[in-house]
Image: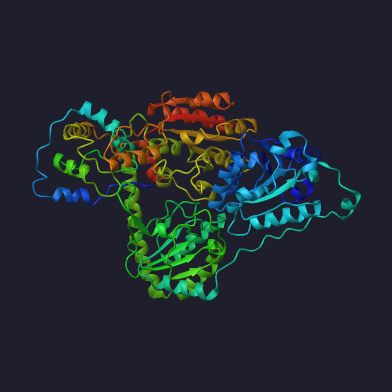
Amino acid sequence: MHRFITPLLLPLLMLVPGLAGSEDRAGDPQAGQVRFMRVGCYECHGTVGQGGAGMRLVPLPLPWIGFQIYVRRPGGQMPAYSDKVLGDADLADIYAYLKSIPEGPRAKDIALIEDAADK
Amino acid sequence: MVDVLKSLEFDYVCANPGSSFRGLHESLVNYGGNSRPELITCCHEESSVAMAHGYAKIEGKPLLVMAHGTVGLQHASMAIYNAYADRVPVYILLGNIQDATWRRGDVEWAHSVQDAASMVRDYIKWDDNPVSLAHFAESAVRAYKAALTPPYEPVVIVADAVLQEEPISEQDRRSARIPRLAIPTPPAGDSGAVLEAARLLVNAEHPLIICGRSARTPAGIDLVVELAETLQAPVQDRHFRMNFPTRHPLAGGSIGEADVILALEVGDLWMATHAQTPVNRLGMDSKPLTKAGAKLISIFSGDLYGKSNYQDFGRYCEIDLSIAADAEATLPALIEACKRLLTTGRRQLLKQRGGMLADAAKRRRAADLELAAAGWDASPISTARVTLELWNQIKHEDWSLVSETFPFFSGWPLRLWDMTKAYHYIGGHGAYGIGYGAPAAVGAALANRRHGRLTVNIQCDGDLNYAPAVLWTAAHHRIPILNIMHNNRAYHQELMFLTDMAARANRGIDTARIGTGIDDPNIDYATLAKAYGVFSIGPISDPKELAPAIKRAIEVVKRGEPALVDVITQPR
């Protein structure tokens, strides 16, 4: 079973009036990292949000409200996490964790990837 | 019996020793000289069959397996089902004592059976229970022929203990002969149907080729390439075999855009062309991924042969032109028909299409490379980084990747490595029976050894734990193989399913590791490998330590020995 978030839904959420410019909700990145692991986000998105069975989350393409809407009612093969099992405060911590992860080097800055591009 | 088996030119016989075939075992070693076939000592019958499975996908011919007709076959049965679903020939000899008056003691009663093959008859092509040496000779040759007639499948012959152990009578000795083997030529498609397929493909605006197990031999890859280039049509490889070069500019394509789809040995064509409700949603709905009016052509040898009980055949697919034939045998005629139908003007249009597809392939590759950089320095180590660290050290070798990498390893080797040859990738389980990976890899490495190839196995941790002693088999028989552990410390697919189920039930989303985690304590695979006599390094969780570890392990493998690097990896 292959699981993917419907890629089209994320840009669509960005178009919802008021979402693109909305304020990010404050959260605790350290608590968010623990929660990210405990509730299984890492299973599909990797421990640092690099992607895997699910899409890459760093850099996170959504503001807080769009992120919240998506987690509650996702498209594709991602399970819906209701506020009963993952409250807004915990979700805000996860959001803060994802926002805190540095993007890391680009492909062009990594010799092994550059080499693989040619051979 | 040994003379008959030697006539079939088996290189090896994999077996965990068993009293019901002790006579044949002794004869193979002492009368047969332990050569062609040479005994390979296995520690589990599932490993024997899975080794034969991996071996056949590299060497293109069966390897002999011996097992008890009772307890041995019970151990072997899942691996036989994998081979059956993967359309791979495996030749299995079962020991049995048919005559009740010949059974010595309770062990031999417990190890005797009235109809040994019955428990696996649903997923083998043919079996027999010969009662004389002449009968054995005919059935042994017939079984080999059946196994190697497409679609390839496992076969079983029961070797009765009395036939194995009692002297050959003078009368039998005088009349004994070995039947001549003739492998049937694979069936090619009906000429009219092939011409109709060519017309549809040549006139299509957006043709698409989907490959399942289309390259039955190495020549099959060249034929798919020739057809794709003739039509300038994209190829989606479902990677059950190495069907199409991974970096070919025509690799890719979209089912949704296609107006004519040619499926070559695609057993799961309905699944390839439909979307279903995800597992975490209630209900079941499906919709075609194809656009309205798209024509489906299938060339599939599975249409010539099938069974009902096990449901690996998938959902019924509505096909516009269904050609019951072997795809590889049909491709030469299809290619020639397409070439004859192509006009100069049409060729010019196709060239433009090919250019656009090549551009799309370049963009996709650039996106994959960018995605590979994500989490580059992470610990646990990203599967993309493991893939590229490996590639950097094998790309100038004659290498062979013998493990399934999709979905377990996010398919990274398929996305990043330059795969062109049949032995660069051999697909996976067939029936998704876990426990296939390690022994199939060792079997494939056994076949690669003769060719001097560097065998690479990306080994899932859950899979290795079914029958890890195959590592000892590799060490004992000096089978060179580089094992890179994909140690994500979980039955990860099931872990994701459990999370799905909990979220769907709206409860307990933090309990999914119960029953799915492989931790507390963590398994030390390097120590496990050492116990079996295999050189090992690890666990490695710092990505900077990976390259030197791989380098050291490759040095060992190049000396003709197995090696294992335990890598603590990201989930996927």
B355 over B122 or under it: above or below: below
B562 relative position to A108: left or right: right
Left or right, B502 with respect to B143, comes to left
B332 relative position to B249: left or right: right
Name the residue: 43% across, 46% down.
Answer: B414
How far from the left and from the top, in percent, is residue B479? 61, 35
The quarter of the picture where the C terminus of chain B appears is top left
Question: Which image quadrant is residue B218 in?
Answer: bottom right
The reply to whether residue B324 is in sight is yes
Occupied quadrant, residue B253: bottom left
Q: Residue at x 41, y 75 (%)?
A: B344
Give the x, y percent position of residue B480: 59, 35
- Position in image of residue B205 (x %, y %): 35, 69
Q: Is residue B90 above or below residue B106?
A: below
Work out whether residue B336 or residue B217 is closer to the camera in this orientation and state it: B217
On screen, residue A103 above or below B422: above
Question: In the image shown, does B278 or B50 lie closer to the viewer?
Answer: B278
Q: Is residue B164 left or right of residue B467?
A: right
- Frontmost residue, B336 versus B279: B279
